[in-house]
Amino acid sequence: RYLLICLSNFLGIENLPCELQRNFTLMRDLDNRTEEKKGEIDKLAEEYIANVVNLASVQRVEHLQKIQNAYSKCKEFSDDKVQLAMQTYEMVDKHIRRLDADLARFENELKGKLEVSGYESPEARGLKKADSRGLREKRVSRGRGRKKLKEKTPSDVLDMPVDPNEPTYCLCHQVSYGEMIGCDNPDCPIEWFHFACVDLATKPKGKWFCPRCTQDRKKK
């Protein structure tokens, strides 16, 4: 439906050059008439200057009035030309805005049809793959020691360049590496700890609380 609207509007735009040609012809005609009036003004001015001494007072007024009328006519022609120029601009702008609106509707309708048919453009598939890969990498980096692709030692971590976006854990405020244990206090601000930092060699049985939460529990 929108395609037909776009085509119909495009067919209407075929008349645009004729309309522009008409307006430009009128503006050129106004320019010619203005030039003629300017020549008439120059001629009247020369006559007035040459004969002003011999002219009676009434004749001087009449001559100056002719010059004034010619100037007024020139201004009228100029105003008409400005109005024609504004009309031409608005005419072109109206067609451009109509084409933009029709094109936007056509693109939305085409996008809706593609979504209904389940079609995915290569760009959309590429974005989905990139998002999926980034999500997997983020999950691996936030594994917190539960699943280790390659175990890191503290010295390895300290030698690695620091990623400002990678989260830190434990009392040492380092990234996840090696064996880690989670505090069973759901409100623990740190949550995960390296075995070495909390003097653990193996995972303890039952619930385990970090040193900070243990002290807080004793205070209560």
Image (tube, helix red, strand yellow):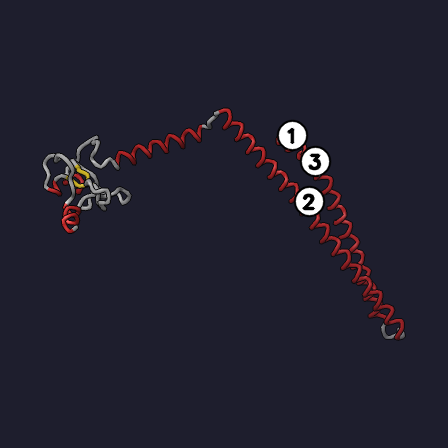
The mark closer to the camera, 1 or 2, is 1
- Circle 3 Cα neighbour tier, 10 Å, few/some/many (<14 / 14–19 / ≥20): few
Q: Is residue 37 left or right of residue 16?
A: right
* Location of the N terminus (image quadrant): top right
Residue 168, position as x, y percentages in the image: 23, 43
Which residue position is annotated with label 1?
4
- Looking at the image, which is closer to me, 131 or 160? 131
Does residue 65 appear left or right of residue 215 in this picture? right
Q: Which residue is mark 2?
A: 91
Amino acid type assigned to the residue bearing label 3 in the image: Gly
Residue occupying the point 26% across, 34% down: 140
Q: Is residue 67 above or below residue 57?
A: above
- The residue located at (71%, 54%) in the rendering is 82
Gap between marks 3 and 2 measured at Cα: 12 Å
Give residue 84's position: percent from left, percent from top.
73, 50
Identity of the residue drawn at 76% across and 59% down: 75
For label 1, the SS is helix
- The residue wearing badge 3 is 12
| Discs 1/3, front | 1
Q: From the viewer's side, name the closer residue of 203 and 135.
A: 203
Task: Decide if residue 100 is on the left or right side of residue 136.
Answer: right
**Mark with earlier residue (3, 2):** 3
